[in-house]
């Protein structure tokens, strides 16, 4: 989908802002940003899902850790080739604890590395659509849409109580 327009809407009422987010989510719009003077964590289910790569790195680290620690146990058992109680040198049951510890350790290391690379240490500048009023006394929504959807999105936002649904052409 090529984004040719950005429809901006400003809300002074929190309830109408939340209602507009619900309507956007229900209408199938998935390219929007919400701004507000308060914490919007409780509205996370209404935001477009962006996902995080941290869980992928943590899972990959955990799987690599489990395999590595199991192989470490198995290969060290094969090097010394010790038979204990008639069991073969490579037996899965004694390797469960080291493999579990490797899963936890490497999963945590993978998550830490992902967080370290995904965090921006330099100050982030707000997007071009951001208005300073959104951090003071009002809430805002910026909807990125195609040119043919511009009027529909603006009407939807105005029907939900937007003070003005202007547009910024990108």
Image: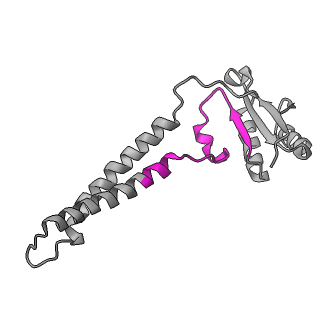
Location of residue 84 by image quarter: bottom left
**Viewer-closest of 5 and 33:** 5
Q: Is residue 120 magenta?
A: no
**Residue at 75% across, 52% down:** 26
Depicted 75 relative to depicted 134: above or below: below
x and y, in percent, of residue 40 in the image: 61, 35
Residue 36: quarter of image: top right
Query: At x 34% / y 55%, what residue is drawn?
Result: 65
Residue 36 in magenta stretch: yes
- In this rendering, the answer to whether 136 lies above or below 113 is above
19 with respect to 125 (left or right): right
Residue 54 location, x and y as percent? 49, 46
20 to the left or right of 98: right
**Residue 27 vs residue 123, the one in the foreground:** 123
Whole-percent x, y for residue 150 in the image: 89, 41
109 horizontally vs 30: left or right: left
Residue that extends furthest to the front in the rendered view of this protein: 79
Q: Quadrant of the C terminus?
A: top right
Residue 124 or residue 156, whichever sits in front: 124
Colour theme: one colour
Residue 127 at x, y = what percent? 71, 28
Q: Residue furthest bottom?
A: 86
Magenta stretch in the rendered image? 31-60
Q: Residue at x 14, y 77 (%)?
A: 87
Tell whether 170 sits left or right of 121. right
Residue 43, by quadrant, is: top right
Q: Report the number of numbered marks.
A: 0
Q: Residue at x 22, y 62 (%)?
A: 73
């Amino acid at each position: 989908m090529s984004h040719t327009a950005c429809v901006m809407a400003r809300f002074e009422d929190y309830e109408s802002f939340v209602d507009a987010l619900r309507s956007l989510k229900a209408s199938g719009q998935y390219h929007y940003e919400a701004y507000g003077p308060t914490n919007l964590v409780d509205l996370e289910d209404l935001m477009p899902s962006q996902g995080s790569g941290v869980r992928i790195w943590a899972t990959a680290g955990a799987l690599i850790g489990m395999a590595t620690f199991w192989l470490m146990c198995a290969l060290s058992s094969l090097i010394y080739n010790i038979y204990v109680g008639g069991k073969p040198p490579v037996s899965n049951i004694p390797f469960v604890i080291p493999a579990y510890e490797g899963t936890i350790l490497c999963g945590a290391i993978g998550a830490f590395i992902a967080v370290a690379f995904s965090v921006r240490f330099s100050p982030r500048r707000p997007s071009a659509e951001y208005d300073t009023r959104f951090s003071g006394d009002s809430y805002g929504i910026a909807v990125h849409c195609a040119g043919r959807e511009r009027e529909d999105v603006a009407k939807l936002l105005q029907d939900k109580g937007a003070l003005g649904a202007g547009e910024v052409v990108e």
